[in-house]
């Protein structure tokens, strides 16, 4: 599944900083972050609102450039790349999942998932793109909903489409910013279960959350405050979504029979 040949960490950040200039005021959103993430990790980036998590993720996702510091993605310095090269890199190596799903409303699940390939692989035959999108939807358990529009699906199902869309180009790394922020707790467990499965299959995942009980599904927890990393530890006692789901299902079945 991996598209990389190098043994370098997937992410290497060195003294990374980002300041926003709004009128007279300068906001230091990220103030010198040094961080390495290896292939196969599943990292939560935690912290209160305003601590710089999204700013950091946007830089890691090559959606934004740092003001200073170094960023190597798969061993390649991104500072030297122009917009077009960044877009190619993003399409090839990264998949994104957002809090608000960001699906096109008047478009089927299948077409939503096909969309990234329209930009990244315009020369691949339509038929092949369609097959890949179908495979991605099957992988997230939505093989029977491919003709549905987002409004005909639950929040959890919509987020699954977004995950399928993130997977369709077989990315090295999936970046998720508050992916369970709009979901109830049961559906959140479902999405975290999907992430745990993907991670077991070898995909590296970095997920922003401000909720400790969601970070608890990850293998490593990085904590930010005021643009700095103030904590970074292995999560020894991590939650297992699959087991929790099974327990919930059993309890429900019992309640129904009683
Ligand atoms: P988090 O995702 O942890 O809530 P953000 O990275 O969104 O934090 O924001 C960090 C800080 O940077 C906040 O003070 C926020 O107001 C500021 N900020 C974020 N984006 C911008 C922007 N585009 N322009 C100006 N300030 C911004
Ligand atoms: Mg944020």
Image: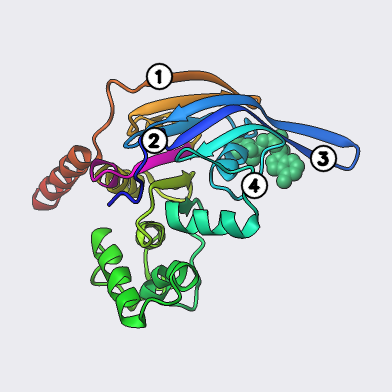
Which span of residues is magenta-colored? 198-208
Position in image of residue 98 (x %, y %)? 50, 52
Q: Earlier in the sequence, mark 4 or mark 3?
A: 3
Res. 64 mark: 4
Can residue 204 be found in the magenta stretch? yes
Distance from the alpha carbon under mark 2 to that under mark 1: 15 Å
Disc 4 on helix, strand or loop? Answer: loop
Picture layout, residue 106 above or below residue 235:
below
Distance from the alpha carbon under mark 4 to that under mark 3: 14 Å
Residue highlighted by disc 3: 21
Whether ligand 1 has any atom under 8 Å from the Cβ at mark 3 is answered as yes
Distance from the alpha carbon under mark 3 to that under mark 2: 33 Å
Distance from the alpha carbon under mark 4 to that under mark 1: 27 Å
Q: Nearer the viewer, mark 3 or mark 2?
A: 3
Disc 2 on helix, strand or loop? Answer: helix
Position in image of residue 93 (x %, y %)? 43, 52
Residue highlighted by disc 2: 214
Q: Earlier in the sequence, mark 4 or mark 1?
A: 4
């Amino acid at each position: 599944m991996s598209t990389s040949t190098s043994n370098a960490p997937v992410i290497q950040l060195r003294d990374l900083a980002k300041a926003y200039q709004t009128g007279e005021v300068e906001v230091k959103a990220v103030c010198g972050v040094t961080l390495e993430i290896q292939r196969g990790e599943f990292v939560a980036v935690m912290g209160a609102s305003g601590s710089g998590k999204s700013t950091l993720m946007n830089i890691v996702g090559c959606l934004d450039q740092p003001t200073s510091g170094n960023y190597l993605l798969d061993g390649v310095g991104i500072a030297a790349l122009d917009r077009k090269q960044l877009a190619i890199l993003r399409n090839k190596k990264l998949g994104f999942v957002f809090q608000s799903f960001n699906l096109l409303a008047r478009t089927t699940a299948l077409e939503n998932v096909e969309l990234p390939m329209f930009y990244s692989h315009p020369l691949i035959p339509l038929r092949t793109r369609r097959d890949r999108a179908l495979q991605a939807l099957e992988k997230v358990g939505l093989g029977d909903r491919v003709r549905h529009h987002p409004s005909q699906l639950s929040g959890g199902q919509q987020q699954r489409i977004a995950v399928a869309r993130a997977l369709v180009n077989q990315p090295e790394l999936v970046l998720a910013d508050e992916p369970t922020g709009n979901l109830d707790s049961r559906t959140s467990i479902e999405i975290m279960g999907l992430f745990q499965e993907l991670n077991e299959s070898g995909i590296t995942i970095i997920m922003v959350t401000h909720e400790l009980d969601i970070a608890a599904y990850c293998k490593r927890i990085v904590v930010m405050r005021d643009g700095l990393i103030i904590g970074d530890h292995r999560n020894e006692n991590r939650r297992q979504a699959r087991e929790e789901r099974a327990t919930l299902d059993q309890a429900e079945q019992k309640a129904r029979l009683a």
